[in-house]
């Protein structure tokens, strides 16, 4: 096996865990890139124990991640159907969507993550031999600093409607970093843009989430934010959003998600087609 240079920090490894879970799914979706990752690293001792630790930190973790994945797959399909041809995934991790979703011709897909993860993912994709139906660009950037410029330099065009995907990251940023991320996304969004995001329910920062937090802490992963005013938060930035609890049967496709981890899944459109002040 090639030296895969696995990103070492705990948060990057949660992306590997998510891929591990997705690799086993055959009904809600199939994820060939995750399958490839598992074939390469399935016997990696450190990773296997990390995955087990994540699994045991909350009974509902795996099913929730599968339902979450399918929820955003469905939303991206709607954005494509509405004519969107530019996608940006923030904190993309090992998400295999650019290699597994059927993208309309001409789709550009930007996957932004920290440099080590971006390098790892790009090399993994190349080794997988998977054919992509979109034109993908990996963008090495830090969401807590200026990430808009690296995104533009990679070819992102703010005058084109964009589908933004923010999955598995807002809970690891501070509230002010989350606000700054939303402001930047809004400023970069043309009329017709879509915003799909996940956030943690506030109760996960209290006693309801203590077991999950203890499990994550052993991997040096810390929840930094959670909130319950998602529709208002997005609305104040100019997005009209529909929000579901992660365990809402309406989005479960027949899967039953445990109450913990408790999260929100949101799908927004720019209200009136444009961001305020633009
Ligand atoms: C839980 S994973 C989620 C990955 C992917 N969105 C998914 O759902 O499969 C968190 C990701 O956030 C990335 N990340 C963490 N902090 C970041 C930052 N400051 N800037 C960019 N990416 C970051 C990590 O590298 C990791 O890939």
Image (cartoon, rainbow, N blue to C red):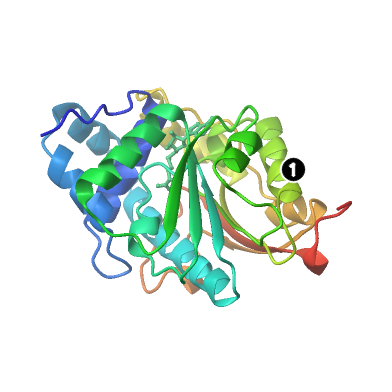
Horizontal and vertical percent for residue 234?
Answer: 73, 53
| Outermost bottom residue | 81
Give whichever of 203, 184 is nearer the camera: 184
Residue 235 seen by the camera: yes
Q: Is mark 1 within 8 Å of ligand 1?
A: no
118 horizontally vs 91: left or right: left
* Residue depicted at x 41% and y 31%: 11
Task: Give the x, y percent position of residue 68.
Answer: 44, 58
- Single out the residue that lies furthest toward the right: 277
Q: Quadrant of the N terminus?
A: top left
Residue drawn at point x = 47 percent, y = 65 percent:
71
27 over 155 or under it: above or below: below
Q: Which residue is mark 1?
A: 183
Q: Position of residue 127 (x, y in %)?
A: 21, 44
Residue 168 visible in the shown view: no
Which residue sits at x=18%, y=35%? Answer: 48
Residue 275 occupies which quadrant of the picture?
bottom right
For the residue labelled by badge 1, is the local secondary structure a helix, a strand or a loop? helix
Task: Characterize the local packing of mark 1: few (<14), some (14-19) or many (20 or more) Cα atoms within 10 angstroms.
Answer: some
Q: Is residue 99 left or right of residue 265?
A: left
Closest to the observer: 115 or 226?
Answer: 115
Q: Depth check: 188 or 61 in front?
A: 188
Number of marks: 1
Q: In the rendered view, does 167 fall on the left or right side of 271?
A: left
């Amino acid at each position: 096996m090639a030296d895969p240079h696995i990103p070492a920090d705990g948060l990057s490894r949660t992306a590997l865990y998510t891929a591990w879970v997705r690799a086993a799914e055959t009904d809600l979706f199939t994820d060939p890139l995750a399958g490839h990752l598992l074939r390469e690293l399935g016997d990696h001792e450190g990773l296997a124990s990390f995955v087990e630790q994540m699994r045991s930190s909350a009974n509902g973790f795996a099913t929730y991640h599968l339902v979450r994945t399918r929820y955003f797959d469905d939303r991206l399909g709607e954005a494509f159907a509405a004519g969107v041809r530019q996608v940006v995934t923030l904190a993309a991790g090992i998400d295999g969507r650019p290699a597994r979703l059927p993208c309309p011709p001409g789709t550009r897909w930007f996957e932004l993550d920290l440099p080590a993860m971006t390098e790892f993912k790009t090399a993994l994709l190349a080794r997988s031999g998977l054919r992509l139906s979109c034109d993908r660009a990996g963008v090495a950037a830090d969401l807590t600093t200026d990430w808009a410029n690296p995104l533009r330099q990679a070819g992102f065009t703010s005058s084109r409607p964009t589908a933004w995907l923010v999955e598995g990251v807002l809970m690891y940023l501070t509230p002010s970093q989350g606000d700054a991320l939303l402001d930047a996304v809004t400023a970069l969004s043309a009329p017709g843009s879509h915003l799909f995001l996940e956030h943690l329910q506030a109760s996960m920062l209290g006693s309801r989430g203590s077991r999950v937090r203890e499990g994550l802490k052993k991997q040096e992963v810390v929840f930094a934010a959670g909130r319950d005013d998602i529709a208002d938060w997005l609305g104040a930035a100019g997005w009209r959003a529909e929000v579901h609890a992660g365990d809402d049967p309406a989005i479960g496709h027949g899967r039953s998600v445990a109450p913990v981890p408790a999260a929100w899944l949101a799908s927004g459109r720019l209200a009136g087609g444009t961001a305020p002040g633009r």
